[in-house]
Amino acid sequence: MTPIRLTVAAALALLVATGCGPAQETAPAAGAAGAGRTPAPTDHAGPRPRDPGSVGGLRSAFPGAGGPVPEPAAEPLGGPADRGPGEGSASRKDTSGEGAPEEAVAAYVAALSRTGEPERMREGLELTAEDSTARTYLAHRAAVARARADGGDPARDTGVERTGDGYELCPAAGPTSDPACTAYGGFTARAGLITGLLVNGRDPGPGLLAPEGVEAGSEGVRATLLTAYQSVTDKSLVVTAEFTADANASLDLPHAVYQRGEGREVRAEDAVGRYELDAGGSTHAAFSFPGAIPGGTLRVSGCLEECSALVDIALPVR
């Protein structure tokens, strides 16, 4: 039996075992921080919104300990689907005329569902074609899940259910809401590798960005852009990055801002990751900015130990 078939077999076993349980694309609020609030719908696992009554001023808008937050059925005007493949479009719709192998699709969806195990999510990348929408989408979801885990609040794995035309990933019901599911279908492939997919009937490709070599630094703290994604069903932009520090440093992730154009600044609605870095340490971080699109700059501040020096990182998101 080849390695790919082993992966597929394991994925199929996972699908049978999970059924439709705790699953979603974003992170629900964890513990008391999310009580009394309805999670904002989004199609990505990620940071948690601010809440004055929560620790650190954060609550959850991404997939969290209570389960990821799914995409809504309808999209507001102004989302990626409403503009052409211009600015902010990192990839176009993947069409090859070749249907994706069912076993590969099942394994890919199983990888998407492992939001509590980011490295297991990344194992699904071997099922995708290089530089494809399917690969970038999974890499983004895995990066957000990793940021949650690095921040000490990992998401739960999501449940999977087979439907007539694809799969649904469903989160666990939160303290004040019923679970909302995200539909996946329309998978395409090239040479047996998955290239494209539809999320709630929409192509996520135009809103995805996964550049290489985009970095910025300040006072020995360095940031590398990993992914950016504007949801196909809401207008939030989620940016993921990796931060490393040469010396002990504190990052003010909750107060990160996104700048696009002169004088236009959006405060992060959600932010997850590790705030305190030891010398030589690193963290993944994820930020959600309502109404933003790729092409701007992520700004994150902080300071070295005892605020001996201020950190001001300006990371291009393009």
Image (tube, rainbow, N blue to C red):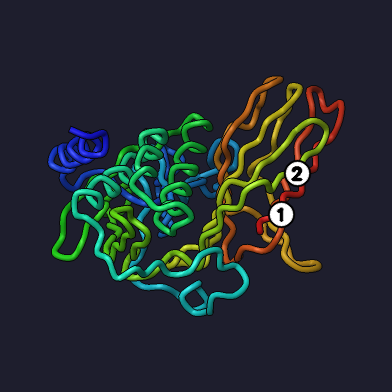
Q: Nearer the viewer, residue 32 or 149?
A: 149
- The amino acid at mark 2 is Ala
Labels 1 & 2 near each other (Cβ < 8 A): yes
- The amino acid at mark 1 is Pro
| Label ID, residue 128 | none
Q: CA distance from mark 1 to mark 2?
A: 8 Å
Q: Which residue is mark 1?
A: 316
- Estimate how packed mark 1 is, as few (under 14), some (14 to 19) or many (20 or more) residues with alpha carbons within 10 Å: some
Asked if residue 258 lies left or right of residue 153, the reply is right
Please state the horizontal and vertical placement of residue 137, each as a whole percent of the image: 43, 54
Q: Which residue is mark 2?
A: 216
Count of numbered marks: 2
Q: Vertically, is 97 above or below 288?
A: below
Residue 169 in sight here = yes
Q: Residue at x 59, y 58 (%)?
A: 289
- Estimate how packed mark 2 is, as few (under 14), some (14 to 19) or many (20 or more) residues with alpha carbons within 10 Å: some
Please state the horizontal and vertical placement of residue 70, each as a whole percent of the image: 35, 56
Which mark sits nearer the N-terminus, 1 or 2? 2
Q: In the rendered image, which quarter contains the C terminus?
A: bottom right
Q: Vertically, is 168 above or below 83?
A: above
Query: Is disc 1 placed on a helix, strand or loop?
Result: strand
Asked if residue 60 lies left or right of residue 18, the reply is right
Q: Vertically, is 309 above or below 141?
A: above
Query: Is disc 2 placed on a helix, strand or loop?
Result: strand
Asked if residue 164 lies left or right of residue 262, the reply is left
